[in-house]
Amino acid sequence: MFEPQIISFEQLSGALDISKPVIVVDGQDYTGVQIAAHTLAADFGNRNHYRHSFKLSSPSNSRFIRQTERFLPIEGKWESFVTSLVTQPLDGIDSALVIAGSDKRGAIFGAYTVSEQIGVSPWYWWADVPILSKSKIFALPTATLHGEPSVKFRGIFINDEAPALTSWVLEKFGSKYNVEFYKHVFELLLRLKANYLWPAMWPGYPYPGNSFFVDDPLNQKTADDYGIVVSTSHHEPMQRATNEWLQSDKGQWDWASNKANISQFFREGAERAKSYDSYFTVGMRGDGDSPISGTDPKALMEDIINTQRSIITEVYGNSTAVNQVWALYKEVQAIYDQGLQVPDDITLLFADDNFGNIRRLATQTERQRSGGSGIYYHMEYVGSPISYKWLNTNSLGKIHHQLSLAKMTGTDRIWVFNVADIKPMEVPLTFALTFAYNHTTISTDSIPEYLLQYARREIPDASEADVEETSDLLLSHSRLMGIRKHEHTEQSVFSVLNYREADRWASVWDALNKRADSLSARVSQASSAAFFQLVLQPIKASQIFYTLRVAQARNNLFGQERANTANVWADRTLELFDKDYDIEEEYHSLLHGKWNHIMAQAHYGYVSSWVPPIRNMITGMYYVQRRQKSVPAVGNIGVRIDGSAGSHVGLFNEGNHLSQPSREPSLILPLFSPYNPLDFSSPGFPCHPVKGTLDDHTTDQLVNVTVDWSSGSYEEVTLPLVKVAPDASFAGHVQADGVVSILAPHFVESTAASDGTTYHVLPHLGRSIEYSGAVGLLPYNTTVAFHSGRPLP
């Protein structure tokens, strides 16, 4: 989206009309370059309703490019490309747009950059973004230079893929994750300028689960043909899938007791990968992705890695002949930090805490390693203390902050993102891979501009006003996701008593949902499916979920009070529960069932474990018997002060819960009577509303009470009154309710250090329901000295 412009739909001076291109690729070039050329030809066909077959090459495999000096700036560069209009590039061709890559993927990225600029979104298939027709397409007369990428290896981990993605794959592609499925994955990655894959590997249904290497013999070869570097997950060493071991009948996955069989298992993986571009995962975890067993994990890990290196030497002739990565996930990082020495060429892959907070970054010494370091980052997670894998719950502000830390500290050899089912992670994945390819294109302040470009690409026929509204909806959704994930929100999380927190949380989602609904009505039929998947469904499903949780909380509160309103909120909860499934069914019926099953992940019913529920279920409902009267001493109408549940809620014993009259002068509420208008007005205490009716259909009436401070004082009232009147010149924050609450960006003063380090407001990061932001030090790689728990001056 932020690449130099190559294409125009207007005929500018010197531009070349390429509306009906003949695409030429050297027959000796890489298979992946030729695949990209054919795909680009198809993209031009889709774009303009015809198919024709400029010049696309990589220097090492193209005789033409090797002879052309203008492409020297990319010589020896990693995944870079140039474009230029060239006169008479070949016999019979007067002029052409030439795309030249420094290597295989450089040329491929060049082709897909042109494709994107003529109007084909990387998500055209995965999110059904329409491809609009243009009568004319021109190549601009300006040479462009692209690359090198900010991160060398950038990719995804397809993980925790059952039940949603697996059920979809079984229905659409057959019994396995076969090459036809993976072709769509490979193309998506390359269009997003990614190059690295941990393939689907979950053990499960149908038994034994997924294994990239054996589910389809063409998977590994086709990945190499396309230009994708295949690796394996953090606990699957040496190009072997966990499920291969489960079927091997070779004993326990325990190094101490079964070293010989496991070593042979490793050797077979190394031999099988010999012909392909691979990145070997080394090290080992225990059975089922658990901590490694044994009394001395450090010694075991050292022996494991040494054995793996020996196997690589036997198979490849040199221990450094293939790229290797060691994932420092969970307890493995502690083993490394104990001082385990690993060869300098092995990439150290640090991990986040499973919730988007990177635990460890490269030190100055580690930055000098030839293998470099990288990060394994979760956009979804299955595990303790609680999973989250239903919807996108990622804050773009947080992702930017964490990835910026990684880049600024040189932790940038590999970035791999756990994206579960790929859908519905379209927004955060695109953001992360855009940043990984060129981190200078997105700053902490320019996230809204990024989303404008994203919305313009994914809803291509929207008006500019609707593009702006789409981008703001996405930004608001991202900000709210930074506050609380769905699966981490039970009914007790947002308070219905204090500061109207639950009301504020529900209302902000209600407002966002209304805006999304309003915009949806204006979206064209062509873009409706994409808008639903990328914007409307994430917002609407979230609004239903969070509103349901607040409804449950209110049901609980009023149920404990034995108030009729409890039943209203019980009914509302069940209504929302049905709406939750309605929108799931709407997603699955989209485009005649193209995405059936993809939203099948249960998300209600985490009880006391991180293990995902097999089916949605809600608990803890309160229901009162409305036909039954309360005890006579209490009566059938109650008054509750907002912010307090009261004492002995819903309980009463006449022996010790006797009412005590207030002393005079005092605020005395008028006598209440069922089904008659009630007047709440009182001098000095303006109320709104002042009148109301309670009956079977209006079971609750909220009355806002304010204070007229000029009317005098009272010895005793139902609410404590404290009049605070700061001096008119006061600037700062005033205590209220015994608390001084200061949001981080609302600081009074900030002074930069002598080296230029300063506190900077991160406007799209923070955990306040009201849009406030957060504060961090810039630059991100600032070194801060500490003494006695406090920064030194």
Image (cartoon, rainbow, N blue to C red):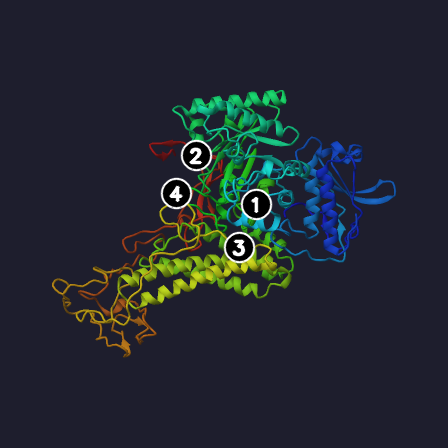
Of circles 1 and 3, which is in front? 3
Label 3 – label 2 distance at C-alpha: 37 Å
**Which residue in the structure is indicated by mark 1?**
442
Q: Which mark is residue 474?
A: 3
**In the figure, is residue 24 to the left or right of 598?**
right
Dot 4, crowdedness within 10 Å: few (<14), some or many (≥20)? few
Q: Are marks 1 and 4 in contact (CB under 8 Å)?
A: no
**Mark 3 or mark 4: which is in front?**
4
Q: Which mark is residue 355?
A: none
From the image, tell me which residue sits under label 4.
385
Hey, what amino acid is under mark 4?
Pro
At label 3, which amino acid type do we have?
Leu
The numbered mark, 2 or 1, whose residue comes first in the sequence reads 2
- Inter-mark Cα distance, 1 to 3: 16 Å
Does 690 appear above or below 172?
A: below
Upstream in sequence: badge 3 or badge 2? 2
Q: In the image, what residue type sits under mark 1?
A: Ile
